[in-house]
Image (spheres, helix red, strand yellow):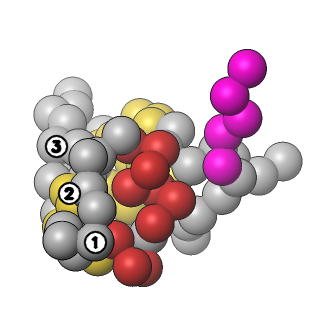
Amino acid sequence: MEEYLGVIKLSAIDWEPEGYMFCDGRTLKVKDHQALAAVLGNSWDHVYEEFTLPTLSSPEGTKYIICVKGLFPPRY
């Protein structure tokens, strides 16, 4: 089953699985990740070209990862 965009998981691996990125506050281009920017609730319009992933501290030996390629979550 494909994961929903924006889902955050705690992982014990030290590499980014396909479709995920570390929650390390990196900057992404909106044009490359429009759906993820919308899911994260960043307030942006055509003036803003970038947004940042969350920065999350994790217990030693683990890292938080966020799904960046997946399904757009439904609104119920």
| Three-letter code for the amino acid on which mark 1 is drawn | His
Name the mark nearer the viewer: 2 or 3.
2
Residue 54 makes an appearance in the image? yes
Magenta: predominant secondary structure element?
Answer: loop
Element marked by disc 1? loop
Q: Mark 1, residues whose alpha carbon is within 10 Å: few (<14), some, or many (≥20)?
A: few
Give the residues drawn in magenta, as a range. Answer: 72-76
Q: Earlier in the sequence, mark 1 or mark 2?
A: 1
Q: Position of residue 56 (x, y in %)?
A: 19, 36
Residue 28 makes an appearance in the image? no
Residue designated by label 3 = 55
Left/right of residue 5 with respect to residue 37 in the rendered view: right
Name the residue rendered at 45%, 37% in the picture.
8
Proximity of marks 2 and 3: CB atoms separated by less than 8 Å: yes
Left/right of residue 18 with respect to residue 37 in the rendered view: right
Residue designated by label 1 = 46
| Three-letter code for the amino acid on which mark 2 is drawn | Thr
Q: Would residue 73 be counted in the magenta stretch?
A: yes
Residue designated by label 2 = 52
Q: Quadrant location of residue 57? A: top left
